[in-house]
Amino acid sequence: MTNKNNKKVTMPQSYLSKQVSINWASKQENPDRRPVSESINGFFSEMLFAVTVFLILTAIVVSIWLVFLI
Amino acid sequence: MIRRVTKQDFTIVFHYVGRIILGIGFIMLVPLVTSLLSKEFSAAVDFVIGGSICFIFGLLVIKFFKTEKSPELFHAMLITAITWLIACLFGAIPHYLSGHFGSYLDAYFDVMSGFTTTGLSIIKDLDHVSNGLNMWRHILTFVGGQGIVVLALTFLVKASGGAFKIMAGEGKDEALVPSVKHTSHIIWNISLWMLVAGTLVLSVIAWIDGFSFSRGLLHGMWMFMSAWSTGGFAPMSQNAIFYHSFAFEIGNQIFMILGSFNFVLHYKVWRGKTNELWKNIEIRSFLITMSISLFLVTVGLAAGGIFNGLGSLIRRGLFIMLSAHTGTGQMTIYAAQFNHSWAQMAMLGVFIAMIIGGSMASTAGGLKNMRVAVIFKGIWHEVKRIISPESAYISTKYHHVKDMTINSDLVRQAALIVLSFFALFTIGTIAGLFCNYSLDRSGFEAISAGANVGLSNGITSYAMPTFLKVMYIFLMWVGRLEFMAVYVFFGAIGIMVLKRKKA
């Protein structure tokens, strides 16, 4: 990332060290640290997807019910 | 040339089995703490006894069968097959001591049902079971869903070259990352994060519905474990009907859907690849087969006139269908209603959904969405090849994490497992017929046990014949391990018998 004067800008070390992350690897291995935000985004995407699937399936049931009602 | 089973093979196999039984002892600490917190001292004693026996057996076996050798594929398959049988033997100790089971076989049945995430139960007076035993039953489901061996790899076994082979024997044959230990860590990380979120969601619904704080928390946690692990156990005998809550049912259905997904898919999505959800062949296959079977069920129920209201169709028809297709087995109808209230077309829909099941490397059972998709793609590939000019190069692709091409090896492997599953269902059905149950009831229960679903039409009860209990234990075990480990287990026994005869 660069600023207006084309100088490289880095985040202060103090900020980086405060980022919350999860180590997905075991202690015996090289750490696989990922920011929590990445996992939270994934979690909510999955939840949203499951809700969408449920709504699609409900729509199928409603459509068939309407056909029988008519 | 067929290999001989040597003393060293026994040493390697039982060394790992001992470690895993030690792990079962550690897990018993959770229901023990639950019992103590709930002031159920009699149940606490059951877990102290059960845990102590696991620790003593595990430590003795590890000491007696000491080895530094990595297991080969042959050992890995034997470890998996034997572990699941022995783990149920030790896991059933607190069950039996609780007094809620007529015999040790009944207790063994319940533990096998829990570990394999089937959910069929023959417990007596479930409504008055202690919190400790309920916690143990649901933890069995939760641990079994991720895999007993996966748990051991995460906490008890050093990373080794043979570790992935053991994991593959348990049906988790897709490595998320090159390291097996890392893969099992990821599986547990995802499951534990989901446990926190899912417990919170279902507990809040229970509290709003009037449950006390501790009861709502426990029921929320147990029902989440049941849904996410596609297990099907519930703390009350009426299963999901007990809650009389549409919101609770919706929550459970969402977690059933998520629980039936491949752990590779979870990992990719949690690493930012959210579009994988729409592109993945397993999800597409699930959506297509679920829609077809749901169509059959809804038409069958609406035409039958018993569940013809919109509310009933959603709360009973859709719930049961999701429960069947994800292999969960939670129920919003009574078992006998399958026999009297469900039209034949609706039953066909449930049969199809139960047989297909969830995704590969997930907590679900059945043929699996991937195999069904690969076989259909294989058929389509053959049709394309025949109708194209002979000089044309034909390629059929599918997407699972990355773009892949259909080949005859993939189709052959999928077809072999599918054939084995149908043979298993047939054996189970014949066993039901032998005990004088009708063809449709026998078939339904056999598929439910073999595909690790857990829906029941009433055959499964503590009063059913002992022969059928043993058969269903066999079906659950074989269906969960997906054949290869079981074939190797019986192969090894065959080799030993032949060797003894020759000697």
Image (cartoon, helix red, strand yellow):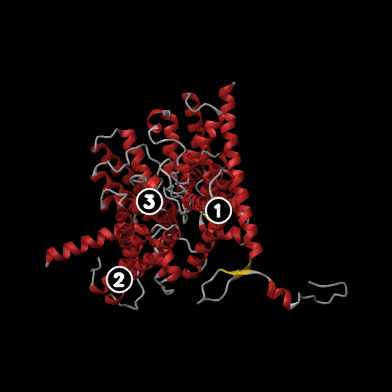
In the rendering, which numbered label is found on residue A66?
Answer: none
Label 1 and label 2: CA atoms lie apart by 35 Å
Mark 2 highlights which residue?
B56
Sequence order check, earlier mark of 3 and 2: 2
Are discs 1 and 2 both within one chain?
Answer: yes
Sequence order check, earlier mark of 3 and 1: 1
Callout 1 touching callout 2 (CB < 8 Å): no
Q: In this rendering, does residue B396 appear at all?
A: no
**Residue B163 place in picture, x, y as percent:** 41, 69
Residue at image position (25%, 65%) is B2
- Viewer-proximal residue among B223 and B143: B223
Q: Residues within 10 Å of mark 2 (few under 14, many from 20)?
A: some
- Position of B388 relative to B214 (above/below): above
Label 3 and label 1: CA atoms lie apart by 33 Å
In the displayed image of the protein, which residue is found farthest to the top? A70
Quadrant in which the N terminus of chain B is drawn: bottom left
